[in-house]
Image: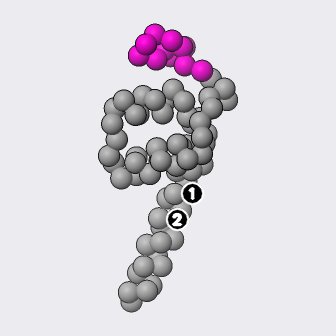
Amino acid sequence: MTNTPSGQPLPKSHERKGSLLRTVRAVAWSLIGLRKGSEYQQDVEKLNPLHIIVVGLIAVFLLVIGLIGLVNWIV
């Protein structure tokens, strides 16, 4: 079992409680590439990995659709 930096075991992914807003913020900062190490550790401890994957896929889909729309608008 993996432990947190404080030595406490991490909860299983289905036991983690993270808000949707916190998950969206974590994915947005990750897409930009600007992230503090301490915030990353908090996300690892609190956010559900399945939620991160779903929000990440939606964010990438919206980014691609936005870029396609921008290119069609310019051309």
At a point 41% along the width and 16% down the height, the residue shown is: 5
- Tell me how far mark 2 sits from mark 1, CA to CA: 6 Å
Q: What colour scheme has been applied to the protein in the rendered image? A: one colour
Task: Tell me which amino acid carries mark 1.
Answer: Ile
Task: Tell me which amino acid carries mark 2.
Answer: Leu
Relative depth, front residue between 44 and 22? 22
Query: Could you tell me if the residues under marks 2 and 1 are in contact, i.e. CB atoms within 8 Å?
Result: yes
Q: In the structure shown, which secondary structural element does the residue marked by tag 1 occupy?
A: helix
Magenta-colored span: 1-11
Q: Residue 18 at x, y = what percent?
A: 59, 36
At a point 40% along the width and 48% down the height, the residue shown is: 29
Disc 2 crowd, CA 10 A, few/some/many (<14, 14-19, 20+)? few
Q: Which mark is residue 58?
A: 1
- Quarter of the view holding residue 9: top right
Q: Residue 39 at x, y = what percent?
A: 40, 34
State whether residue 24 is above or below residue 9.
below
- Quarter of the view holding residue 13: top right
- The residue that mark 2 highlights is 62
